[in-house]
Image (cartoon, coloured by chain):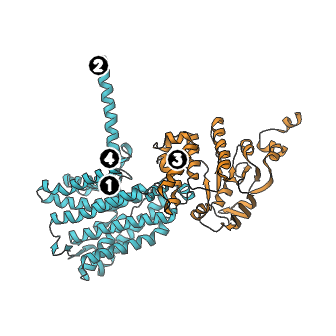
Chain colours: A cyan, B orange
């Protein structure tokens, strides 16, 4: 337990001091997005890595959070914080209600149903032009502010987004280490066995689906208020797949892995701008290669790979000595 | 303690249990024997509401449990060791045991009491104690069965539903498992409803037995009577007619 706390403190210190070394500018802007995607990836990881329930429609919750926040503030001039709270509660309620029928499904069928959910929500964003502005998007969303401090620069937004991201990580680490986390892992392995021990499998699955939706909506609301413009393209099917790739690259069930996955998939496209429209191809390739050679993700896979390399190097050296 | 009255259970259209009635007295070990597909496992699953009965009544300590959900039934004191062990393989031995006490910690029971019961399980199965941090998927078959039983005991059951504890185990391990089953009854007075393919071993520890065939109870007698019953010997104990004639 103490080791976990140390790990978190080191991580928090790194996040806190990172901008000091970066002298601001464009990279800080990218790191804001790393923060938002970390929240989203952690949210999906709770559902997929911990409870073993796949979702190909996470972008729906992300988008709903963004649009509820955006419409309330840009169109109805609500206070951004109030809008954020409403967005989170509303999406939580939607996830809870949808969860009961959807999570009755398993495996491929669950994947199909969540995929459908994502597509339907995406279509709604596009077609309800009167409310969302349709494909051309919604602009004029105000920044968040605390006591007169407006979060309108990359640096300020960095600290805003990352304080929420750190809170999400801390909560998720706690959840994962708790009795509930253990029960979720049990569901992941065998639903029948978990049920026999008295775990209310159906309710617990819906609850973690709801938590996942709530975190995603929070990320959506943060996105809307930092970028100040949203359009349906940011919440399409591609985003759901991107999130899935982040979780798998980082490692299923590893909270810090989700951060790594989010960081890699957000930073890489910035470094390799040449891919442009082919990014989905790159995601696909990364996904295939990772599941083949590092099914445990980077957090578990790299140490494993390093160890086996070390063993090999040692073996070569000792055979050299003998010669 | 447990009374099952005229239950019928269906899997879709398949009529798996037909008007089954049976009972288990307090402190008794009762064996269910029968061939594959006779409905032995279904009876256990029906009691624990994994496959709830379509009609009929099940009473536990006089309380009707046939309409209750699994978690409520576990809370009342019924624990099941499922067929094929079903331990949580990616989790450690210790985590598996903790999950057995899931409802107790949910009810706010103190950690100290749960730790005490964990130690009791380790005392019962010393080999689990040596491997408490080990991933349970790496245990041997016998150890996995011990863990499955230990996990069920963590719920502090008064009635234990045991499904095929001897399946796939070496004879020595089967003896070990059944030694523990007898010890449980002796020390804690736990009642046990036991399903077993290995009818001979089961009837040796049991007080009474029921014989099932295609979803019906066709015979109920004391275990020693069943062991001596020629039809049972021929059908379930691996002795053919000739052998009986020759004696």
Question: Disc 3 and disc 2: Cα gap in Å?
Answer: 50 Å
Note whether A246 is above or below A163 in the view shown.
above
The mark that comes first in sequence, 2 or 4, is: 4
**Image mark 2: chain:** A
Residue that numbered label 2 is attached to: A321
Residue A298 - label = 4
Camera-side residue: A132 or B22?
A: B22
Residue that numbered label 1 is attached to: A258
Specify whether residue A164 is in view: yes
Q: Are marks 3 and 2 in contact (CB under 8 Å)?
A: no
Residue that numbered label 3 is attached to: B119
The mark that comes first in sequence, 4 or 1, is: 1
Note whether B43 is above or below A301 in the view shown.
below
How many C-alpha atoms fall within 10 Å of the one at disc 3: few (<14), some, or many (≥20)?
some
Q: Position of residue A211 (x, y in %)?
A: 39, 66
Residue that appears at 77% across and 44% down: B236
**Image mark 4: chain:** A
Quadrant containing the C terminus of chain B in the rendered view:
top right
Q: Secondary structure at mark 1?
A: helix
């Amino acid at each position: 337990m103490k080791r976990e706390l140390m790990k978190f403190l080191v991580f928090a210190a790194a996040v806190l001091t990172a901008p000091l070394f970066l002298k601001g500018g464009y990279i800080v802007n990218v790191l804001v997005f790393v923060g938002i995607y970390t929240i989203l990836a952690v949210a999906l990881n709770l559902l997929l890595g911990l409870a073993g329930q796949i979702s190909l429609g996470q972008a729906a919750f992300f988008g709903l959070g963004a649009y509820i926040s955006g419409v309330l503030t840009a169109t109805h001039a609500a206070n951004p914080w109030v809008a954020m709270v409403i967005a989170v509660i509303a999406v939580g309620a939607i996830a809870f209600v949808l969860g009961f029928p959807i999570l009755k499904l398993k495996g491929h069928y669950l994947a199909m149903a969540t995929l459908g959910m994502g597509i339907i929500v995406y279509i709604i964003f596009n077609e309800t032009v009167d409310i969302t502005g349709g494909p051309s998007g919604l602009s004029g969303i105000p920044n968040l502010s605390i006591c007169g401090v407006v979060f309108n620069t990359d640096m300020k937004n960095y600290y805003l987004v990352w304080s929420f991201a750190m809170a999400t990580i801390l909560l998720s680490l706690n959840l994962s280490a708790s009795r509930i986390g253990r029960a979720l892992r049990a569901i992941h392995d065998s639903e029948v066995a978990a049920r026999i021990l008295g775990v209310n499998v159906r309710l617990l699955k819906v609850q973690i689906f709801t938590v996942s939706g709530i975190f995603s909506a929070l990320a959506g609301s943060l996105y809307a208020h930092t970028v100040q413009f949203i359009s349906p393209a940011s919440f399409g099917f591609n985003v759901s797949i991107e999130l899935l790739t982040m979780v798998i690259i980082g490692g299923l069930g590893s909270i810090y892995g989700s951060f790594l996955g989010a960081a890699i998939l957000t930073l890489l496209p910035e470094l390799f701008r040449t891919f442009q429209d082919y990014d989905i191809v790159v995601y696909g390739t990364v996904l295939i290669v990772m599941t083949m050679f590092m099914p445990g993700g980077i957090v578990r896979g790299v140490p494993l790979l390093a160890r086996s390399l070390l063993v090999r190097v040692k073996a070569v050296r000792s055979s050299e000595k003998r010669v | 303690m447990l009374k099952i009255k005229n239950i019928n259970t269906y899997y879709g259209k398949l009529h798996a249990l037909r008007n089954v009635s049976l009972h288990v007295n307090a402190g008794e070990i009762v064996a269910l024997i029968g061939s594959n597909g006779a409905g032995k496992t279904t009876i256990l699953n029906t009691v624990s509401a994994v496959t709830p009965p379509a009609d009929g009544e099940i009473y536990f300590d006089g309380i009707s449990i046939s309409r209750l959900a699994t978690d409520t039934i576990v809370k009342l004191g019924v624990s099941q060791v499922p067929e094929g062990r079903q331990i949580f393989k990616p989790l450690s031995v210790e985590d598996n045991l903790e999950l057995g006490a899931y409802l107790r910690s949910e009810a706010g029971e103190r950690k100290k009491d749960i730790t005490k019961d964990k130690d009791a399980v380790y005392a019962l199965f010393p080999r689990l104690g040596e491997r408490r941090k080990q991933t349970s998927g790496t245990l041997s078959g016998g150890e996995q069965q011990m863990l499955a039983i230990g996990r069920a005991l963590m719920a502090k059951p008064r009635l234990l539903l045991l499904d095929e504890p001897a399946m796939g185990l070496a004879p020595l391990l089967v003896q070990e498992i059944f030694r523990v089953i007898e010890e449980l009854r002796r020390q804690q007075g736990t009642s046990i409803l036991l399903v077993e393919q290995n009818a001979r071993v089961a009837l040796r520890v049991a007080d009474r037995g029921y014989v099932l065939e295609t979803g019906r109870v066709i015979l109920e007698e004391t275990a020693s009577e069943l062991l001596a019953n020629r039809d049972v010997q021929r059908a379930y104990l691996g002795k053919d007619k000739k052998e009986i004639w020759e004696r």
